[in-house]
Amino acid sequence: MTSTRNKADLFNAMGIGPVWELRSQDEPSKPDAMASGVGLDEMLPASLSLESLQEMVAVCKKCGLCETRKQTVFADGIPHAPLMVVGEGPGVDEDATGRPFVGKSGQLLDRMLKAVGASRTNNTYIANVVKCHPPGNRNPEQAEIEQCSPYLVQQIKASGPKVLLLVGRFAIQTLLNTKKPVGELRGVVHQVTLDGRDIPAVVTYHPAYLLRRPEEKSKAWDDLLLLKQQGLI
Ligand code: URA
Ligand code: SF4
């Protein structure tokens, strides 16, 4: 069990403030009955390396986001790492640098990961549902997600994570094939089934949402604890 001292350090790392007692800390995580119904991978060859996927994405014009992007944003971190984080789509900073989660949300994500001993320089691979920046930072549209998510599915297969952390509703709804809000889906470990293999998936709020609603950070902390409890990172 995490000592209060350690917990305080971890909360500070996340910028959360006072230490709350965690209700669900010792409860075993229940497997979720709703396995993913991802049927997104039919449109690409069965197995592609991360390198060939990245090359395909770099020249992709499947949706209108190609018109306004500066560059595609494929991934960051360690390919084949045990933890894979999936976000929504590149923001302005990511469009400018070509790397996911480098802006303010990314900085919070890094602090969240650090709190459970994870980092993109060590044991984490990071990608998004859409690989091109939606102009004006708008949400990705359903059609754009449908065009782009087969890359993500192949990317997960090629990277082969032991566990997924899905941040925000677009990653969650796409990979768990649901329309339910994040608040209804968190607290249990889901399974994303690809090629008959179940990959445990923990869901949490998007860091951009947590920056707007810091009072929700304690829930995100519970989610990270659930991730850590899987013993896979
Ligand atoms: N938000 C995301 O979901 N992904 C990024 O890469 C940056 C911000
Ligand atoms: Fe292609 Fe995805 Fe970019 Fe659309 S968002 S152009 S599908 S890489």
Image (cartoon, helix red, strand yellow):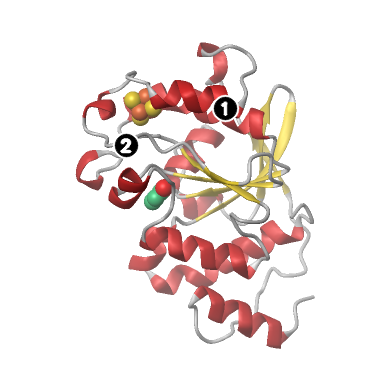
Please identify the quadrant where the C terminus is shown.
bottom right
Q: Element at badge 2?
A: loop
Q: Are marks 1 and 2 in contact (CB under 8 Å)?
A: no
Q: Element at badge 1?
A: helix
Left or right, residue 65 beside residue 40:
left
Q: Position of residue 135 (x, y in %)?
A: 22, 40
Q: Is 22 above or below relative to 220?
A: below
Which disc, if any, is residue 24?
Answer: none
Q: Position of residue 48 (x, y in %)?
A: 61, 19
Which amino acid, by three-letter code, is at mark 1? Answer: Glu
Which amino acid, by three-letter code, is at mark 2? Answer: Pro
Frontmost residue, 52 versus 104? 52
What residue appears at the point 70 percent right and 38 percent down from the top-left corner? Answer: 199
Which disc, if any, is residue 140?
Answer: 2
Frontmost residue, 165 versus 97? 97
Which disc, if any, is residue 51?
Answer: 1
What residue appears at the point 61 percent right and 33 percent down from the top-left corner? Answer: 156
Q: Is residue 38 visible?
A: no
Q: Is residue 16 visible?
A: yes
Q: Would you say the beta carbon of the disc 2 residue lies within 8 angstroms of ligand 2?
A: yes
Left or right, residue 5 beside residue 51:
right
Category of crowding for the residue at label 1, using alpha-carbon neighbours closer than 10 angstroms: few (below 14), some (14–19), many (at least 20): few
Q: Position of residue 63 (x, y in %)?
A: 30, 22
Structural distance between the alpha carbons of marks 1 and 2: 25 Å
